[in-house]
Image (cartoon, helix red, strand yellow):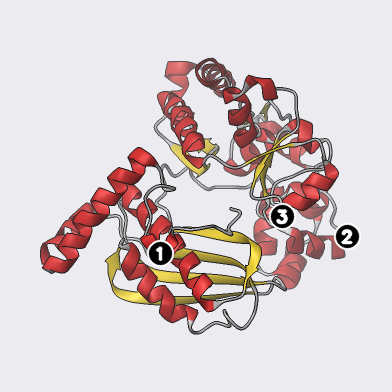
Amino acid sequence: MDAFYPSVEILDRPELAGKPVIVGGGLERGVVSSASYEARKFGVHSAQPTAQARRLCPDGIFLPPRMKRYQEVSRNIFSIFRRFTPIVEPLSIDEAFLDVAGSTRLFGQPERIARAIKEEVLRETGLTVSAGVAPSKFVAKIASDMEKPDGLTVVLPDRVTAFLDPLSIARMWGAGKAGQRALHRLNIRTFRDLRQFPVILLEQKLGKSGVKMHQLASGIDERDVIPDRDPKSIGHERTFSQDILEHGEAKKAILSLATTVAHRMRCERVRGKTITLKVKYSDFSQITRSTTLSSFTDDGLKIYGELLALLNSTEVGRRPVRLLGVSLSQLDLSESQQQLLLFHESGVLEKRQRLNAALDSLQEKHGEKYVKPGTLIGPHKTSR
């Protein structure tokens, strides 16, 4: 999708069309989630501090994220994708791979399918899609970014090398800044440079990742499109408008995070076993602390209790804290396992399950701002 979050905001508020719209956290300490193309002309981009974005684009329209609305639109878009093929692998809320090899008899050649998807998404949602059509996931991903917004780039099998060769390695999907710096030290600037570099030397310098990048630069990518991959973790984090200085304030923030994550897990019908606390101090140094339970849970109070023990192994309360995050991994997605656990739970836990179900229902009806633990009632410092 093209500038998905700002595009949804403009869809709901047409008066914002043509203006620099920036979706993200609070103005003081938050970061940009996404920016319209009008804002990008000023140098605004995702993951940029919101304060910097405001300096670059002082007339920008800054809006808080509305995740429920974005998820609603995303579901509509993915339902359109699945009309053309059941083999859809989501990458994020607004991006996916589609394997259409088995759909050509019904819908025509891949380029025709891509155009039909773009047209249906535009007609049914009012939003534009940029698509890449290619023989592999790697090339399709790069192609989808070539002509944004509302683009369509088709790379035929016999044109893969010609398409990739002149591109900067900055377009190497999956190679971060460190990987790009390592390639630059070898005087590798383009995909052609990478493809022609001796693979033995790449392995010596960069290990297995060097070999993998050489294959990708040569257009070799055998990965299949895997539909509906299970999530590896569910989490939430918040950057604070003012550093947290007191241990008690951190405990409140962690309770809020645990409550949010537990609610999301119950909505996804999963439970987790490994609980992780993330702490970023005011000097931007960061630590994580984890613990693994003996059984799966989706209960906020249980998660919170474990987090308090993890909190005591940090310097929170002695050092200013900029960000806190909570996540659960080692997820169990088996309905039968959950039912078995429920069958063996004590009366106290059964009551908690019923309470959680009631809270979830109230939250869906009234919103999380109105349904929360009493400890959290009061002014908030969080910006996102």
Judging depth in this view, the residue of 10 and 126 nearest the camera is 10
Write the residue at 59% across / 35% down.
135
* C-alpha gap between disc 2 and disc 1: 57 Å
Instruction: For marks 3 and 2, give the CA distance.
Output: 40 Å
Please state which amino acid type lies under the numbered disc 2.
Asn
The residue most toward the right is 187
Query: Mark 3 against mark 2, which lies toward the viewer?
Result: 3
Q: Find residue 43 and report its horizontal and vertical position in percent.
A: 82, 42
SS state under label 2: loop
| Residue 28 image label | 3
Q: Earlier in the sequence, mark 3 or mark 2?
A: 3
Return the mark for residue 375: 1
SS of the residue at dot 3? loop
Q: Residue at x 52, y 71 (%)?
A: 250
Q: Quadrant of residue 300?
A: bottom left
Reading the image, the residue beneath label 2 is 187
Q: Amino acid at mark 1?
A: Thr
Q: Residue at x 36, y 58 (%)?
A: 262
Q: Residue furthest front?
A: 378
In the image, residue 61 above or below residue 288: above
